[in-house]
């Protein structure tokens, strides 16, 4: 059939090597099929999502140095963790309380000094980022129930200049698992910020339950109600 310009319409012809695609696809599908039952749950499971995420921060801040070695309390920087829904990121002025005199000539501190002098905030990269539709209140967990930072964030006091990384997936199923039986994850409120604390070896099986009663932690039925987190 002639085209509008009078020339013959040319048909596309696949190159000969394309004939190899079909057997390769068949071989690949058959070869991976025995592993699908293991791969699909592994990839799709919430327990494998986002664990180990460790973004590069604009300043190589070491919690291991500041918290573990120097003994700075979590609340000195994260001032709202006991009283608000979020744990505040410290302003540059908090850093400069010490660094106006300590290592103020270090290249690592240069972005902090620049931020302090210009008023431009440091753009820290958020590590633990819950979906917008989830309501989470730090004060309720920390000050109310006696849940330590360790339960969700791991041993942050052992994380060095490489930065903070996620140790739990913070998925809905992970939260519900704790809400169904919160007792093992509770501790006395005055020990919440002692990240190295371990439950006493001689503690009986009702230790956590007693803490739950002492802290007035709601029953598992109320804790697993959808409206607890989705508001």
Image (cartoon, rainbow, N blue to C red):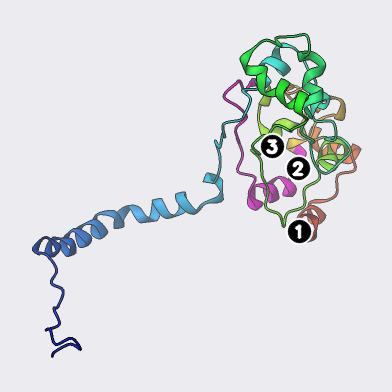
- How many numbered callouts? 3
Q: CA distance from mark 2 to mark 3?
A: 13 Å
Q: State the image quarter where residue 10 is shown.
A: bottom left
> Which of these two is toward me, 6 or 197?
6
Q: Which residue is mark 1?
A: 230
The residue at 57%/31% (across/down) is: 56
The residue at 57%/24% (across/down) is: 162
175 relative to 192, above or below: below
> Which of these two is toward me, 124 or 51?
124
Q: Which mark is residue 182?
A: 2
Image location of residue 95, percent across then percent down: 77, 21
> Which of these two is toward me, 224 or 170?
170
Q: Which residue is mark 3?
A: 152
First-in-chain label (2 vs 3): 3
Element on which disc 3 rests: helix
Image location of residue 103, percent across then percent down: 70, 9
Q: Is residue 123 visible?
A: yes
The residue carrying pointer 2 sits among few (fewer than 14), some (14 to 19) or many (20 or more) residues within 10 Å by Cα, namely many
The residue at 81%/28% (across/down) is: 192
Q: Which mark is residue 101?
A: none
The quadrant the N terminus occupies is: bottom left
Q: Is residue 28 highlighted in magenta?
A: no
Image location of residue 83, percent across then percent down: 89, 38
């Amino acid at each position: 059939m002639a085209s509008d310009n009078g020339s013959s319409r040319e048909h596309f012809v696949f190159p000969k090597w394309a004939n190899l695609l079909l057997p390769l696809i068949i071989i690949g599908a058959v070869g991976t099929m025995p592993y699908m039952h293991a791969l699909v749950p592994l990839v799709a499971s919430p327990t494998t999502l986002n664990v180990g995420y460790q973004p590069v921060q604009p300043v190589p801040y070491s919690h291991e140095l500041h918290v573990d070695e120097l003994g700075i309390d979590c609340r000195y920087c994260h001032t709202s963790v006991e009283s608000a829904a979020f744990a505040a990121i410290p302003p540059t002025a908090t850093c400069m309380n010490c660094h106006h005199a300590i290592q103020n000539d270090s290249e690592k501190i240069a972005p902090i000094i620049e931020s302090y002098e210009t008023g431009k905030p440091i753009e820290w990269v958020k590590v633990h980022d819950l979906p917008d539709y989830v309501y989470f209140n730090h004060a309720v967990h920390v000050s109310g129930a006696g849940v330590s930072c360790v339960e969700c964030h791991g041993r942050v006091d052992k994380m060095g200049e490489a930065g903070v990384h996620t140790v739990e997936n913070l998925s809905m199923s992970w939260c519900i698992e704790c809400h169904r039986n919160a007792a093992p994850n509770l501790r006395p409120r005055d020990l919440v910020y002692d990240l190295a604390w371990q439950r006493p070896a001689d503690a009986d099986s009702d230790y956590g339950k007693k803490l739950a009663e002492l802290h007035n932690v709601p029953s598992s039925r109320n804790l697993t109600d959808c409206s607890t987190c989705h508001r």
